[in-house]
Each structure stands twice: as C-alpha cells, then as structure tokens.
Image: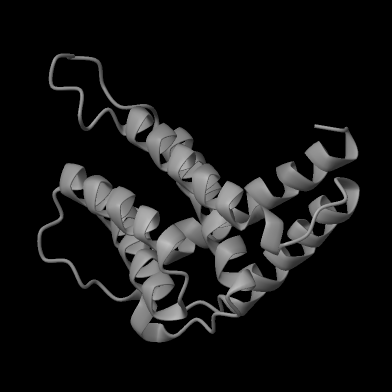
C-alpha cells in the first residue's frame, strides 16, 4: 500500500492555507466540503457518461476522468482530516463484488449524504473505501490516484496564489 499519510499531510497543508486566506475554520466548512464532494462526484459521473443511456458519445479521456476523481479525493481526505482518520490497509481493499459503476455512484451519493448526518470515523471509512473502489472500477490503480492527487494538489496551491 502506498503511504497515504503523505496525501493526508498535503491536504492538511492546503486546507490550512485556504482556511487562513478566507478566514474560516474547519468545523464551519464541514457541510460545505460534503456538498463539494457530492458535486465532484456528479462531475465525475458526467465525465464517465456511465448513466447517459440516451447518448452514443464516449466517456472523456482517462486523464480527465482521473482529474475529476482526484478532485473528490481532495474533499474526502479533507473531511477525513477533520475527523482525525488514520488510514489503514483495509480501507484500500476491494470490498465490492459488483463493480457496476452506476450502482457505485448511487451508493456513494447515499453514503456521503449519510456522513453529513452521522459524522463518525466508521462511516467515513465506509465512504472512503467505496470511493477507492469506484476508482478501481474506473480502471485506476492506487498509484494512478496518488500521482493524480499530487498533480492536482499543485494546481490547487497555484489557484490560491492567484486568488482563485
């Protein structure tokens, strides 16, 4: 397993920077980060086009889908940092036998909404594991996710420098 502690620390640094720039605090932004995660999940679904049964248009390129996926990782890890989550190897294992992407999206929407009502590490772990499983179902390895996160994290820091 890749050392996810590096991503956790990078996200904490980015979050702290954003909170300071915008004079906010972690607790007050929890629900907004949940909404941001839901929005990113929708943007990811849109790029995969998995639900668009009425269209023959192909999904976006793999790198576009990966970027949307790691956008969700940013908000997910941000929420995990608030909850002081310790990432375990178990959270990165395949636990879903049915890799129907549409079902995974629906399940994640439901679980993320529940996380906003049931703010506990155990529930976060379920959301996190299923988000990782969605990545696997989309054909990403943990290494892809890790590299994609690093690239997007740099972009997010540059955005803060330019008053994004």
Visible in this render: residue 62?
A: no
Q: Quadrant of residue 136?
A: bottom left
Residue 49, x across and y down, in percent: 27, 27
Residue 30, x across and y down, in percent: 61, 57
Q: Nearer the viewer, residue 113 or 147?
A: 113
Q: Quadrant of the C terminus?
A: top right
Q: Nearer the viewer, residue 106 or 118?
A: 118
- Image label count: 0
Residue 31, x across and y down, in percent: 56, 52
132 over 158 or under it: above or below: below
Residue depicted at 78% across the width and 59% down the height = 25
6 over 98 or under it: above or below: below
Q: Quadrant of the N terminus?
A: bottom left
Residue depicted at 24% across the width and 15% down the height = 57
Residue depicted at 20% across the width and 30% down the height = 51
Q: Nearer the viewer, residue 5 or 17?
A: 17
Q: Nearer the viewer, residue 124 or 53?
A: 124
111 displayed left or right of 74 = left
List the single residue furthest toward the front: 117
111 over 12 or under it: above or below: above
Visible in this render: residue 25?
A: yes
Q: Quadrant of residue 41?
A: top left
Residue 84, x across and y down, in percent: 60, 80
50 displayed left or right of 142 = left
24 displayed left or right of 57 = right
User: What colour scheme governs how the chains and residues are painted in the rendered image of this protein?
Assistant: one colour
79 displayed left or right of 39 = right
């Amino acid at each position: 397993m890749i050392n996810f502690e590096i991503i956790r620390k990078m996200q904490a640094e980015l979050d702290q920077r954003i909170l300071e720039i915008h004079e906010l605090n972690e607790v007050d932004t929890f629900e907004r980060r949940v909404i941001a995660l839901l929005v990113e999940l929708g943007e990811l679904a849109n790029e995969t086009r998995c639900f668009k049964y009425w269209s023959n248009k192909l999904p976006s390129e793999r790198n576009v889908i990966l970027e949307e996926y790691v956008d969700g990782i940013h908000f997910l890890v941000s929420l995990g940092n608030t909850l002081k989550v310790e990432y375990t190897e178990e959270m990165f294992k395949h636990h879903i036998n049915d890799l129907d992407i549409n079902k995974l999206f629906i399940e994640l929407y439901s679980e993320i909404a529940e996380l906003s009502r049931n703010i506990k590490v155990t529930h976060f772990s379920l959301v996190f594991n299923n988000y990782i499983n969605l990545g696997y179902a989309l054909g990403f390895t943990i290494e892809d996710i890790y590299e994609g996160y690093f690239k997007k994290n740099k972009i997010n820091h540059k955005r803060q420098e330019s008053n994004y």
